[in-house]
């Protein structure tokens, strides 16, 4: 989860309010959560009837916003004013438009108003006087999109925070099929929790049962098909991913292969230990220990090291360094070279 988001929520829960908040960025998940908090958690239910004002940028002029912010709260210590879709706010004539029209208020905000500005889908221009003044007087939060290869990490962390452990394999499975839509991922995990409230860990079986994602074609099993020398399964999966490139973006595939070969590399140094000790050392489920250790016979340390070097090369090529090939070409070539190592 976003550390900056958590810090803002912590300060709000301690009743330490800034006079103005600007929340912008391309990732809607945190913006929606933050907006929801300002709508429901700062004022109690009886206070909200008179002291919560929600405005929409497309529907109001900047003067309407300032008027709302300058009002005094009724039967409460403070009021909350929320401006949604702030990028669409209509301003005055000439260059004095939109959010910049609010500079006068931001420079001298009402001490009895908590003003929250939601600027979704893109970042506000940090070079403007408006954003600089918000940073000076209040809080500026940007919700950035999480890179595809970081989504499994985010899923694992989210599981920890809600008390529903998500092992790495399952996190990669969800990421590969649900993409980087955080709200969609959260909704699917919560759907499983509702059906199995007493379970403390997400499993592949639960994912398949309640989300419908099959283990037959998932990015986590892809590198395992290679190192287990199961050619039929490998070519089946390769054909599927080549035909369904959206289900397997190169950054996620490379990340999955890297994690797999990193485990194989570490596995060479824990031979002879118990399955439980190996699972702990490799950060994996004991269920996968047998397959991992059996792969070492045909994947000696030098071969694993060469594959890790290959992954570094193809990672650069996937972002356009010394290559103009598309993901399908790179994937086909990368798997072929690993088979030849």
Image (cartoon, rainbow, N blue to C red):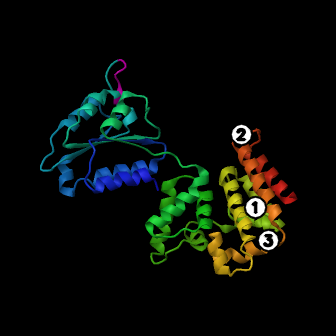
Q: Which residue is mark 1?
A: 237
Badge 2 marks a residue whose secondary structure is: loop
Badge 1 marks a residue whose secondary structure is: helix
Q: Which residues are magenta?
A: 94-99
Badge 3 marks a residue whose secondary structure is: helix
The tally of labels here is: 3
44 relative position to 178: left or right: left
> Which residue shows up at 42% across the image and 50% down it?
4
In the rendered image of this protein, does residue 10 appear above or below residue 97? below
In the rendered image of this protein, does residue 194 appear above or below residue 12? below
Q: Which residue is mark 3?
A: 296
> Which residue shows up at 37% across the image and 36% down it?
86
Residue 90 seen in the current view = no
In the rendered image of this protein, does residue 127 appear above or below residue 28? above
Check whether the beta carbons of the residues at disc 3 and disc 1 lie within 8 A of each other.
no
> Which residue shows up at 87% across the image and 58% down it?
340
Can you tell which mark lies on residue 320? 2
Q: Nearer the viewer, mark 3 or mark 1?
A: 3
Give residue 261's position: percent from left, percent from top: 73, 62
């Amino acid at each position: 989860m976003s550390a900056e988001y958590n810090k803002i929520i912590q300060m709000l829960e301690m009743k330490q309010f800034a006079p103005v908040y600007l929340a912008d960025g391309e990732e809607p998940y945190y913006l929606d959560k933050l907006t929801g908090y300002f709508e429901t958690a700062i004022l109690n239910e009886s206070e909200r009837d008179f002291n919560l004002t929600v405005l929409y940028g497309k529907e109001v002029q900047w003067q309407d916003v300032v008027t709302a912010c300058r009002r005094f709260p009724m039967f409460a210590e403070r009021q909350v004013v929320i401006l949604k879709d702030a990028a669409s706010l209509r301003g005055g004539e000439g260059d004095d438009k939109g959010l910049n029209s609010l500079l006068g208020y931001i420079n001298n905000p009402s001490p009895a108003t908590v003003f929250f500005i939601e600027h979704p889908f893109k970042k506000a221009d940090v070079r403007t006087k408006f954003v600089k003044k918000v940073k000076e007087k209040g809080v500026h939060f940007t919700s950035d999109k999480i890179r595809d290869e970081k989504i499994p990490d985010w899923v694992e962390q989210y599981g920890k925070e809600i008390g529903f452990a998500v092992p790495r394999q399952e996190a990669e499975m969800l990421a590969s099929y649900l993409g980087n839509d955080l709200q969609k991922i959260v909704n699917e995990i919560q759907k499983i929790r509702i059906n199995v409230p007493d379970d403390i860990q997400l499993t592949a079986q639960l994912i398949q049962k309640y989300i419908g994602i099959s283990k037959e074609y998932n990015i986590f099993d892809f590198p395992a098909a290679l190192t287990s020398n199961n050619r039929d399964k490998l070519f089946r999966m390769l054909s599927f991913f080549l035909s369904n490139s959206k289900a397997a973006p190169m950054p996620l595939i490379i990340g999955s292969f890297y994690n797999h070969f990193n485990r194989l590399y570490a596995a060479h140094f824990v031979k002879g230990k118990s399955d439980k000790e190996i699972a702990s050392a490799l950060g994996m489920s004991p269920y996968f220990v047998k397959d991992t250790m059996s792969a070492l016979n045909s994947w000696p340390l030098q071969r694993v090291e060469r594959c890790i070097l290959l992954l570094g090369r193809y990672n650069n090529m996937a972002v356009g360094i010394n290559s103009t090939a598309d993901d399908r070409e790179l994937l086909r070539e990368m798997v072929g070279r690993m088979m030849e190592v």
